[in-house]
């Protein structure tokens, strides 16, 4: 393609000469002095950038520097030898996990399946609950009553995992934590949902009960806190939208359906993509405190598998490979969810 000078110059009708386009001159000046403008901006708002330093250090020391240890997935594990000095063994650890055909491989696939199921059930039942709570908070007209309800639902999020699991054990097993039934177990027995024998044995000793207990306690712990984002999106809706809906004869349910939900749809999509990104990120702390030998078949997840194999059995290479597989699958899920959301609703993370 032939480029002419007139592609970049404009004709001055008064002088009859060509000169640079004023807009192009401004763009060239901005590009030429870009870093100078950036430096001036940093100097002007230096206090804000100083506040970024702790966060940058946290990401460096807790997110980026530990990535060097990922090389352990491809090297023979030796506890006292640095990663750089270990023997390179390629994909042997991944082969042992995926197609080893031994007990270790079977346990990994079971843990991966449990991780996916726990996260999938949490996505199906746990994700809508904050939205429902936010809709409920929006309909409470008394600010004092709303504040009380919000504090009550936010409080479990600020308790440690140990406290929440201890409360769960007390509600299921009772105050002794050794024998007898807790309040929840007694209620289920009286309602005929579980037998008295299962209640006495302990609901947490039943593999079929673990996933339900895990999801219910997860909703109890995080639904209120997660509703903050959706409630903030709801209160940002213009009152004129509600007034227009009321003029058209829309009741409360119709306003939720045709005004509130479409208005917060972009927020819901973004939060859903983020949640899918953490679909396989089941924390080991809560599972570790709740599961036992009787519930391994449904409770063992990749994180607890890596903890058991890496720390208790001293096989850090296999544990690193397991976590690496977990993270790779999570990354692929984020990419797929973001692509689908971009094509379906033109809303995406990137």
Image (tube, helix red, strand yellow):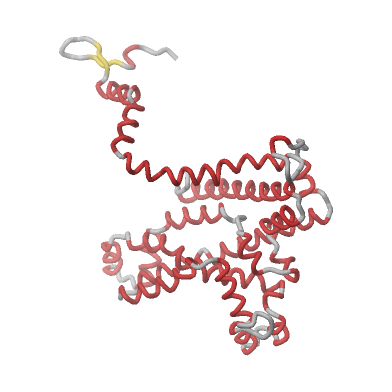
Q: Which residue is painted at 59% across and 47% down in the image? A: 331
Identify whether 56 is placed above or below 137. above
Q: Is residue 70 or residue 264 the one in the foreground? A: 70
Please indicate whether residue 40 sits to the left or right of residue 151 in the image: left
Check the picture and name the quadrant holding the N terminus.
Answer: top left
Q: Nearer the viewer, residue 17 or 288?
A: 288
In this view, 333 is above or below 218: above
Picture coordinates of residue 253 (x, y %)?
A: 39, 72
Q: Residue at x 72, y 48 (%)?
A: 316
Image check: 158 left or right of 165? left
Residue 101 position (above or below residue 138): above
Q: Residue lying at the far right in this picture: please name it.
A: 102
Task: Find residue 27 and report its image quarter.
Answer: top left
201 with respect to 219 (left or right): right
Across and down, in percent, residue 43 comes to 31, 35
Q: Quadrant of residue 163?
A: bottom right
> Residue 242: x percent and y percent?
30, 65
- Give the residue at the far bottom of this rendering: 190
Q: How many marks?
A: 0
Which residue occupies the foreground of this view, 276 or 54? 54
x and y, in percent, of residue 231 in the image: 38, 64
The residue at the far left in this view is: 14
For this orientation, the residue located farthest to the front is 80
């Amino acid at each position: 393609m032939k480029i002419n000078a007139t592609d970049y110059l404009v004709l001055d009708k008064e002088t009859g000469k060509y000169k640079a386009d004023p807009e192009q001159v401004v763009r060239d000046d901005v590009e030429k002095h870009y870093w100078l403008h950036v430096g001036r901006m940093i100097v002007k708002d230096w206090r804000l950038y100083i506040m970024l330093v702790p966060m940058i250090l946290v990401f460096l020391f807790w997110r980026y520097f530990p990535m060097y240890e990922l090389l352990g997935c491809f090297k023979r594990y030796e506890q006292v030898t640095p990663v750089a000095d270990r023997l390179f063994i390629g994909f042997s650890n991944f082969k042992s996990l995926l197609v080893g055909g031994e007990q270790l491989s079977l346990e990994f696939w079971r843990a991966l399946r449990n991780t996916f199921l726990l996260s999938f059930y949490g996505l199906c039942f746990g994700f809508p609950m904050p939205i429902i709570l936010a809709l409920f908070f929006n309909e409470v007209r008394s600010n004092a009553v709303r504040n009380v309800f919000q504090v009550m639902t936010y409080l479990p999020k600020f308790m440690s995992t140990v406290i929440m699991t201890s409360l769960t054990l007390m509600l299921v097993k009772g105050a002794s934590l050794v024998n007898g039934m807790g309040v929840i177990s007694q209620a289920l027995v009286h309602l005929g949902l579980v037998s008295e024998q299962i209640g006495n044995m302990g609901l947490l000793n039943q593999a079929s009960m673990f996933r339900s207990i895990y999801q219910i306690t997860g909703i109890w712990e995080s639904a209120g806190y997660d509703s903050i984002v959706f409630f903030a999106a709801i209160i940002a809706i213009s009152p004129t939208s509600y007034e227009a809906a009321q003029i058209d004869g829309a009741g409360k349910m119709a306003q939720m359906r045709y005004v509130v939900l479409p208005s917060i749809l972009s927020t819901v999509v973004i939060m859903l993509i983020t949640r899918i990104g953490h679909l396989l990120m089941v924390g080991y702390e809560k599972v570790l405190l709740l599961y036992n030998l009787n519930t391994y078949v449904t409770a063992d997840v990749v994180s607890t598998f890596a903890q058991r194999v890496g720390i208790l059995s001293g096989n850090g290479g296999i544990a690193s490979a397991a976590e690496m597989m977990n993270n790779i699958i999570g990354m692929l899920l984020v990419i797929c969810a973001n692509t689908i959301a971009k094509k379906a609703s033109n809303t995406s993370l990137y």
